Every structure is written in C-alpha cells, then in structure tokens.
Image (cartoon, rainbow, N blue to C red):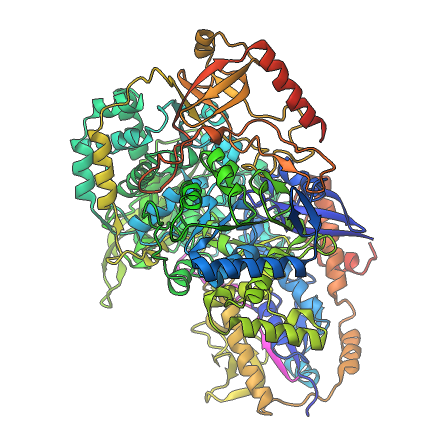
Amino acid sequence: MSAPLRVAIVGSGPAGFYAANDLLKRDPASRVELFDRLPTPGGLVRSGVSPDHAARREVIATYERLAMASHRFRFHGNIEIGRQLTHEDLLRCHHAVIYACGSAGDRRLGIPGEDLPGSHAATSFVSWYNGHPDFAAQSFDLSCERAIVIGNGNVALDVARMLLLGHDRLHPTDVADHALRAFAESRIREVVVLGRRGAAQCAFTTPELLELGHHDLDVRVEHAASAGAKPAGRDARAYAVQLKLRLLDEYAARAALPDARRLVLRFLNSPLAIVGRDRVETLRVVRNRLVSGGRGDLVAESTGEISEITAGLVLRAVGYRGLPVVGLPFDAARGIVPNVGGRIVGENRRPMRGAYVAGWLKRGPSGVIGTNKGCSQETVACLLQDFAGDRLPIPDIDDQGTQRLLTERCPDRVDYLGWKKIDRHERLGGMDQQRLRVKLVDLQRMTAVASGRF
Amino acid sequence: MIRTVFTHCHYCVCLCGVKVTVDNDEVTSIEPDRDNPYTWSDFCRKGKTAAETRKHPQRLMSPMKRVGERYVAATYEEAIADIASRLKRIIAEHGADAVGTYHGNPLGFSFAGSIFFAGLLDALGTGNRYWVGSVDQNNTHVVQQAMYGSELIAMPPDIDECKCFLLVGMDPAQSKFGWTEVVPNGWTRVLNAQAGGADVIVVDPRRSNSAERANTHLAVLPGQDWALLLGLLHVTFEERLERPATAVPLSGVGTLRSLALEADLEDLSARCGIPVPVIRDVARRFAKAPRAMCVMHTGVAHNLTGTIAEWLGNALNAVTDRLDTPGGRRFESGYMDLVKIFAGFAPPTTHRTRLRNLPAIAGFHALAELADEIITPGKGQIRAMIVAAGNPVVSGPDSAALDQAFAGLDLLVAVDTVQRESHRHAHWLIPGTHWLEREGLHALFAGIMDKPFAQYANQALPPPAGIREEWSFFTDLALAMDRPMFGKRGVNGFIRATRWLAHVTGRPQLAMNPRWVEWLLVASGRQLKYGDIRKHPHGWLYREKRYGDLAAAIRTPDKTVHCAPPAFVDECRRHLAEPRSLANPEFPLMMINRRTRESMNSWLNETPGLFEQLRSNSVEIHPQDAATLQLEDGAWTRVISATGAIELPVTISPGARPGVITIAHGWGSRIFDPGETLKAQSFGANRNKLVARTLLDPLSQTPAFNTTRVRLEPLHASAQVTMHASTSEEAAVS
C-alpha cells in the first residue's frame, strides 16, 4: 500500500476549489495543499465578479467550508509558484500538481493607438474596482463625458454598468474604496458598448440584459439588425437569441430618458484605431455588415463606412488570455497549457508526470463559474487514475519537511486562519460604513492583518 | 446548552428561512434567517409563534382510544394492532374502497408524511382518496393537464422583470403571492416593479389591501372573472394585439379566436360588471406591455367557473407570448424532472366515484362528494376513514353533512397534533408532529419555486417523547396489515430487512427512511448532489434562473400548448348561452372569501400568540347594504343560505362591493381536549356550513365557496347576549 496521495493545487479560484473538493471526496486519504499568489482565496470570484452581483461570490465560501471540514486541506496564500517555490519543489513534496491559475492576461485589439493613455484592458479595470492588489495603484481617468467599451460579452456589460451606476448604488457593495472614490467623482454620462457583429450574435446573457432595465439608465440600441421575433421554436439556442433580440427591441422602443446616464449598445461596428495626441481622444470605427462565413455562421465584413466617436476612455473587453507558467509548456495561440483531459502534455503529446491543469488555463477563458466543476472533475479523474496506476512520481519530502520548506521559503505566507482574519477585518470595516465589506488592497497590510500584527 | 438551528417555516408556501434558538429542549426564539438568500423576507407571526403551536395545551401526546364518550391513552402497538385488524376486517368484508382517506394542507408541507401516506394508500388499495386540493387548487391541475399535458406543470411568475401585472382573484398583500407557487417577498417585489413603472391591475370584487395599491382595481362580480378574461381576449383578437409565441408552439388559437370574437363584448361586460371601455383599456395595456403576466388565485379557483377562468387567463398569457418569457409565467425545471418521474412512477388513477361517477383530479376525488359516499348505503360505501393532518368538516362544503356522516363511520382514525372539529367522532387519535420537530428536503417544491432554490430543513427539536413521525406510523400500519407499502410487492420485506439490520448494528440510519426517497429523487435529476444541498443550511440558490425550459417539459402528444381544449370551450359556450344571473329575492347577497395573513385555513386560528387583537372572522359588508339592513358595525347577524346558517358580528367596510359580503374561512373549528379537562375551544364561525356540497364546477369539482348566495337577518338583542356569552366562555379557555 503506497503512502496517501498528496496534491498541490495552484490557484484558488473556482477551478482550484472544485478540484480540491473533488479530490478530498473521491480519495478519502488524500491531502490537498492549495496555493495562491494572493493572501485571499477566490480568484475571479473575488476579483472578477461584479460588486453589484455579490451573491455570486457566495459559491466559493461553501467550497472553502467543505474543504476545511475534511481536515486534509491546507490553504497557503501569498505564495507565488515559480518565484518562492518552483514546480520541481512542489513535486518533491507532492505526488502531483494541478495548475488552476486561470487566464490573467487579456487579449489585445491589435489596432493603432491601443497603448495611448486612456486605453485599457477591461480586465485591468475590473481587477482595479474589485481591489486586486496588483491593480490598486492604477488609475483610470473618469473625467471625460463618454467611455467606450469594445466587446459584446458579459464583462463588457459589467464594466459599462459599473461606469454608470454611480456612487450611491455602489456604496453598499464591496467595490474597492479607491474605485468608489473615483466613481463618486466620475463625469462619465455615456458609455458606448461596441459589437463587431449584430445583436443576434452578441454573447450577453438574457439576465444580464434584463438587469440593465432595473437601473435608471437610458439604454439605446443602435444597428441591432434584429430580424424581429420569429415563430415559436423548440431550439433552446434559437430561443435564447430571440429573447435577447426582443429585449433589445424593447430598449430601442423605450422613450429616451434625457436626464439619465446613457448606455448605448452599438452593433455592427469594429474599431479601427484609437486616435489622440497624448491620450485617447476619439475612436475610429467602421460600419460592418453580416455575410455568411461559409460554415453556416455569420461574420462581420467592413462596409468601408468610417466614423469617429469622441471618448476619453476606451476599455477593450474582448476576452481574457492565459499567461505562460514558468516550467510548463504553453500553447501561445490558444493561451492555454497543452493538455489531454487535464494531463499536461509536452511537445510530442507525451504527458508530463505529475503535472495537471484545470479551469481556464486548461480549456481557455469561457463558461460560467459552474462550468469549471466538470472541468476540474475530469482532471481529478485522470490524476486518480494515474495514482492508481503508479504513474505518479513519489515525493521525497514528507509532510513535516514540506511545512519546514514553506516556513523557510515563504515567511509571509497566509494560511486559512490568516485569510479568515482578513475576511473578518474587511467585514467589520464594512459594517461601520454600512457596506458589505471594505476590501484590503495592500499586500503588506493584508499580511499584517493576517498575522494579527494589526 | 444553546443551539441555533436553521430551517424554513412550513406553514405556507413563502417557506421563510428561520433561525431557531433552542436552549435545552426549549425553543427560546424564532427569527428570520437573514442568511437565507431567498426566502426570509416575508417572515410573519405564524413563524414567530410556531413554538407556541408546538406546545399547544391540548396537544395529543400519545395515541388516544375512544371508549364510549371518553378517550383513554394507549400505546402505538395497541393503536396499530386495533386499527389494522379493524381495517382488515372492513376490507375483507366490503373491499378496499370501503376505506376512505383524506389529507389536509399541513401534510403537504411534510415531504416524508405525504410520500409515505401515498405509500399507505397504495398499500390499502383504495380508490376513495380525498384531499384538500379538491376544495382549493383543482382547477389549476385540470388546466395544466389539458393545456400542457401534465397536472404538475406549474409556472411561477417572473415578477422582477414584469411590466404589467394582471392579478385576478388574489390578495398578495395578505397571501404574499403564495398559493401554488413559491414567490418569497412576492408582493414587495410587485410594488418594487410598480415603483419602476410597472402597471398593476387587480381584479377582485373586494377592495383589498392589494387593490388599494393597484394602478387599476376592477371590482368584478363574484364568479364572473371568466367573462372579463374572455372580454380581454376578445379585444386582444379584435384589435390584433396578439404576439407570436416565442418559447413554445401553440395550437387551437383559431378556435379560441372564434370563441372570443363570437362573444358579445357588451354581454360579457354586463356579466362581469366591468364597463366595455375599461375592458378595452386593460386589454390594450396588458397586450402592449413589453413584459406581462396574468395570474389567477383562489378568488378564481373557488367558483363554479374556476376552471374556464383559469384556462382563459392562461390562454391570454399564451397568445400574448407570456409563457416562459421574461416577466411572464416562467417554467422552473428544478433539479429533477418531477413531471416525468410522476408520469412513470405513479400513472394516473382511473378510479371513479361510486355515486356521481366523477374521475379523480391529481389522483384524488372531491371532498364535496365524501359525505354522500359515506352515508349512501350500497356496495362500495365508505365505512372507515383515515384523516391525516386534515380538517375536512371545516375545509369542505356543507360542514354539517360531513360531520353527520363521520358520526356514522365504523372507524375514524385522525392523525394530527390536536383533536380538531373533524376529529369529533374519531375512534382513534394518533399524535402528529410539528415542523420544528421534523427534518428533510421537500423535493416536490422544486418546480414551484420562482428561482432555482433548495433548502434542507433541519430539525430544531425531536418530537415529544413517545411520539412517532407520521411517516413511521403509516409504514407501521401497512406492515401490521400485511399489505404492501407503495402497492409494490417486496417493499415490506425490504423495510423489515433494513429495520432488522439497523437493530442488530445499532445504527438507526440503516432502516429505510424518507431521506432515502429524497436522495433518490435528487440523484435522479443528475443536477445536484443531495449531500451538497444538506451542506447549505441557509438554503442554496443553485443556479441562475433561466428561460426556455418549458418547450421540452410539455407533455401534450403534439408537444404544443393547447389553447382551446374542447371540454373548456364547450363549458364556456354553455355559460355564454345561459341568461345573466337574475336577482334572487330570497338570497339577495353573494358571499365571498378572503385571505388573512395570520390565518392558514383552519390550521392556526386557535394558536396562542396569533390574533392578539381580534380573534374571529366577521361579516364584512358594504355601508350601503348595512344601511338597508339597518346593521351597525359590530352588531351580530345571522347569515343564512340554502344549506345552513351561522352567526357572526358585522364589520362595515367600504371595501366590499355592494351586494357582496366577505367572510373568511377556517374559523369556527373546535379544538377538543380528549383528556376532557378543558372545554372545547373555538373562535369565529365556520362559513363553509353555508356552502352547498352539490353545486360544483363540473370540470374541477370545486364548490362555490366564493359565490354562495345568502341573506342576513339581524339577531335579537337576547340572542346576541347568549352568543357573546358562549363565545367568551369558550375564548376564556385559551
């Protein structure tokens, strides 16, 4: 009988927690150590989910409790794999490592002017208002009247909503303090959300579109190219598209609210260039039309009709993108770690012993929080198979040695108790101000609170 | 030791999450569970005082056997042996149908209780099954079956996205929007939508609290909602305001259109008492609203036209594209396919009643028929009754007839926490449990919730020493009778084997219990894990709500929504052909019902702690009628119908429509003390004594609770004095 399975998981977002719980449940002797670069677990649940959708942050809390209840689980925050510890270090202490560190990068537009001041990735903006320590020092100039968000996914709507909701609506949420102050002084009155293709092709979901109607926003729809409601169908996808079209028609038919902040959903427009002398001044766009892409899909084709939109802020929300992990192969085209069912594979498609991947880093940035559950389960199944088939390397450092190594290399690490201290601190801070919580955004302050040195 | 237990209230379908503090086997407080993400907001006095109900002074603490005119305490073993042998003898001599059963609303709130009661009924093999739904929600089951192909396709309202509410026969300010759907905080959410610009139209003969807040209140004539709804359809078709259905294919729209257009709007207007221009205006507002819903509740259901009205309201939703669309009636698929499970597991019964040859609806016959089935001699006559958590004498029509019928039974077994009005003639009283003493997942609620939500209810306290949970009694009875539980051979052997295993291993959880059924149902859905649900003590919003699941759930043969089921069309034409109702000089007033937040039918009106101010129902009457009858506010009056008479004080209220009086149901139900140390106690009067048991909606078999003709007679001063005296004497007991 071999020694109990020990697994390290890198990244404590939904994929990491799902993998941890699945392992703990399926192998009742297994031990899991979950690492995160930040002192706080949660990944995008903490730094991606919109502050006005706080209920969706609850998922992770349940999985935290579940994992802790197993007594075979440890959380190690504030440790960066590849810096304080390497992949090889982890494999000396564990049978296997699961990388679930997501897609921290963003996709670029590849147009002139993209690096002008005032042009940013929406992912940075999201991380900033959610208080991610890496982005706390950034600043976003909200002194202009109009902002443009490029992209037609839910992140684009999140960002647009946050820009328009205003201080009073955001105050009770857990939006970062620095962002709340900036939103209070914001002069933005209009946000244009640009979509390359038509309304029927947008990736917004129905509840997100419905929600826009619950805020006092003047929602305008331009160039939706909606074909109108079609007769009843039984195809769930077609129905979802129809629902969205109908909602957009409804917004289009609504009387304008001249005093309200305005959200413009403009379809069939692609950005050509961001123009400005020292900073963003206008966005040059071209009108598109839809043509058949040959595989039954519709693609955007330029009509050559060019116009300009004045704006002081341009946020590109065209997707997250995975970043390479030190010591692992990387598929730069897809922004993922090459893998087969979660087993990381090298150049010749041969699996790397003991190395696994789950979540966005495995399959690319798509799907909702719950999509990661099945994804992580698949990876865990492969791992357990390999463990049962003696295909995993045997760790040469025991549990005590592991703890010694951690103490030595990572003196500032934050354990679960430390995170709970941060959590409590944030909640209590929020109570005083009638806010959900006041997030700590400074790493040093976080570690100080976590260690009780506050 | 002080413990905190999270569960949800089980009195009404708000299912409010509650936080129960328990100190050494005593509940010290019940508060709303603010960490419940879904349901706590409507927390009310019913939940707050639940611990007092549990400790009711007349609570049954052991089985009680009738000996002459007295009751004596007995053991479960004695009770089960005696009941089993008597039931076996009756079945051997007269057949299984000689045993009738009835269960009430509280049993429906116990998943274990209702599933194992069904198991016992299948063990008995009787077709004479009656339930409270037949005096309440039958019309919805009939309409769901005909239009959507299953009696269980409920469509909760998608309130938060709605821009136009057409609320017919309901008073959500009292009911909180709960009836056959779970819509926590529903009324507040309607008002929030209204503040955001939504149009709220309330249809009710009474100017209820809800009607007060509506943009438009239509004081329809009682029982004539169908004419109003047909009028709305008429205008919708005539002005071409229909919208193509996007979520589901429809059939029968042509027939519906002809029916609606053939009807004369002036005639419909005269029938329902709403002027033509108002009907036109409402039809336009509803059809033109981007997102809208028509919802009908008990005001519609408890009528002779309840089924066609429910159908016409559903049809209005269908032809204006309000089915499974945002802001309309959304289908919630839940975490398992209940419709499919029931279609496969419990095929619909074909049993018909002996005397009126009526079919069962949702598996049960109409309570209105029960009295005659008991008193009329002949083969198949009911000679024994098992009543589980029910009070049919008070809940059903013509209470006096059923009371008399029960008096003549060979065996009446009542399972409840206290001995109620309907248990007056019981031969055996079997103690029931309170929801604070039970645990479990109510899997049947999954499809009637307006959001994907699941909560495992935890047990705050064990039942008092010696009291068994209802499901366990039902199982023991089937085993003692040696009849197969759930009607399936081998189940009894299986149960015995697991019990033996539990006994020899000393692990009680190994004995077959309701958790196994809950687990099985959840597992069958392959969406959630039972264990994961249990790990969310405050309840679990397990996914975002979504649209588009209705199309796949429909079970009509052609997979379309049937907008013009022939039986409904015929019944509607029959009503159109009938002359408008004429004035009735003998019974000039129409009696309707109302909801009261603190009441739960006949269940809680005598509970200590509720109704601190006035504990009684009354006759609500319009000032104009009061003046004609020379009735003062607070004066006592006798209410007389063709069926019976009751006496109650008068409340003059400008809310009631002239010619219409309102009397709430559920009152006048006595609580007896089988130990005989206390007098029987009751408050108010049972208005269902006035309702006929023969006059029924032919489609739903529901009596005319909301359209019973009555007259009022002033009581002489002397009579008033006696009435006061007797009531206060009874009330003083509490």
Who's the residue at 24% across and 56% down the image?
A: A290
Name the residue located 25 percent from the left edge and 23 percent from the top edge. B580
Image coordinates for residue B702, horizontal then vertical, percent? 38, 39
Which of A422 and B499 lies nearest the eye of the viewer?
Answer: B499
Q: Residue A261: percent from the left, percent from the top?
A: 45, 35
Query: Which quadrant holds the C terminus of chain B?
Result: top right
Residue A364 spot, x, y in % from top left: 46, 69
Report if residue B225 lies within the magenta region. Answer: no
Q: Magenta stretch?
A: A95-113
User: Which quarter of the figure has residue A17?
Assistant: bottom right
- Number of numbered discs visible in the structure rendering: 0
Residue nearest the viewer, comparing B518 with B348? B348
| Residue B138 in picture, x, y percent from top left | 39, 44
Looking at the image, residue B331 sits to the left or right of residue A438; the answer is left
In the image, taking residue A111 as reference, residue B436 lies left or right, namely: right
Along the viewing direction, whichever of B371 and A83 lies nearer the viewer: B371
Q: Can residue B177 be seen in this view?
A: no
B579 relative to B106, above or below? above
Predominant secondary structure in magenta?
loop
Verify whether residue A112 appears in magenta: yes
